[in-house]
Amino acid sequence: MDVQVALDTVWVLVAGMLVFLMNLGFGLVESGFTRAKNTVNIISKNFIVFAVATIAFFVIGWGLMFGDGNGIFGTQGLFMLGGADNSPAVEEAYSGVYSAISWTGVPLLAKFFFQLVFAATAATIVSGAVAERIKYVSFIVFSFVLVALVYPTVGHWIWGGGWLAELGFWDFAGSTVVHSTGAWAALAGVLVLGPRLGKFGKDGKAHAIPGHNMTSAMTGAMILWFGWFGFNPGSTMAADPGAISHIVVATAFAAAAGALAATALAWAILGKPDVGMTINGALGGLVGITAGCAFVGLGSSLIIGAIAGAIIVLGVLLLDRVRVDDPVGAIAVHGMGGIFGTLAVGLFAQDVIAPGTTGNGLFFGGGFGLLWNQIIGVAAVGAAVFGVSLLVWLAIKATIGVRVSEEEEMEGLDIGEHGNRAYPDFVLTETTF
């Protein structure tokens, strides 16, 4: 193995480890944004989801996503069970099976690990949106199906050489592949579950249900921001100094702009600089830049981040108005932010930044072609993921059920689902209903 391949491999693995750490960030954000009585349930879901995703992606998801096949899904290398080592024989046997990801020279298992942590992220997004009322086992079952079948199928369309890749759709690090996919799946789950008890009054007005630990939420958000410095530049899957430097700075700029824009807009609308909106604004900026971080200029990254941050504030308020209960704002951040970020490639891409890829977007003289391709991709993935996820959620509801009992929800899922409390020595002196 030559020095460049060794450097590329180390970079890809370290970047993948940073993305893995984002599971901790999600757990802290989600538990902080929800009530103390559900903390054990939240952190347990965020812990076990990576285990579930690992098995699902290893057994079938990887092959469906990257295996050679047709424009819809992979048909070769579906079961990676025979390739669980890094011997030259295995590398040679599988080299002609996963041609869509042959452009990077790192070993097969380095490619697998990096893509695995992305797949797990999509499932983790669902956790926050369905929090505080979903059955633990139902979340596990859905997560397995999502990572085994749903996520890799649409992933094949875009990253596996499928029909959207052939069309000319671009999503560098996953605004659509990862984030919108998780959000569409979450939206379907939220609609099947219904809102938490007490969230909406008889008049339809949303009642605030404050999170119990903003310190946890802020810590988690910083871990997510940090992890994104592996998520986006790691998608080069090569230690390319110029490319990863540009992507890191573009990522940082978008997050900063998103945080500031969300803070300002929330301050103007709500009368106070809401810390939850600030946190979600930064995350929205990160989601928004993920599709185009390798294709847009630094000035554009600031604009994209700021618009995404503002969209998240408006999105959270809109979801409350239409009685869609998402305790952590995941649908707004990952769904609306992901949609905008993907479309932003069609607006802000510059061929000079990544020659031979996207070409120029609308704002840089490229016309509507690229933007139209992005619109088609967003619509196709949204329809497919939401439709299939809705069927899966309804099937789970009809068999093992999706929602805990009213009594268990009022008492807290920590006791009913886990027989445990996160803070057994604390005395709660105010209602948690």
Image: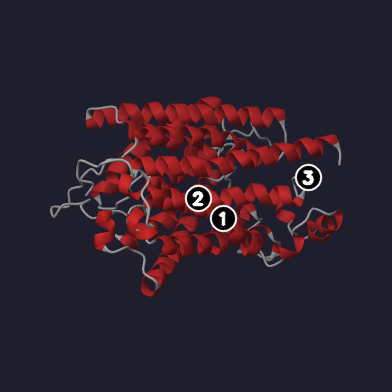
Residue 337 picture location, percent across and down: 43, 42
Badge 2 crowding class, 10 Å Cα cut-off, few under 14, some 14 to 19, many 20 or more, is some
Reading the image, the residue beneath label 3 is 105
Reading the image, the residue beneath label 1 is 51
Callout 3: SS: loop
Nearer-the-camera pick, 281 or 431: 431
Q: Residue at x 25, y 53 (%)?
A: 323
Residue 119 is left or right of residue 198, and the answer is right
Residue 2 in view in this figure: yes
Nearer-the-camera pick, 19 or 303: 19
Q: Which amino acid is tagged 2?
A: Phe
Mark 1 and mark 3 lie on one chain; the one further toward the N terminus is 1
Reading the image, the residue beneath label 2 is 47
Q: Are marks 3 and 2 in contact (CB under 8 Å)?
A: no
> Disc 2 to disc 1, how far (Cα)?
8 Å
The quadrant the N terminus occupies is top right
- Mark nearest the camera among 1 and 3 is 1
Q: Which amino acid is tagged 3?
A: Gly
Nearer-the-camera pick, 292 or 44: 44
Mark 3 and mark 2 lie on one chain; the one further toward the N terminus is 2
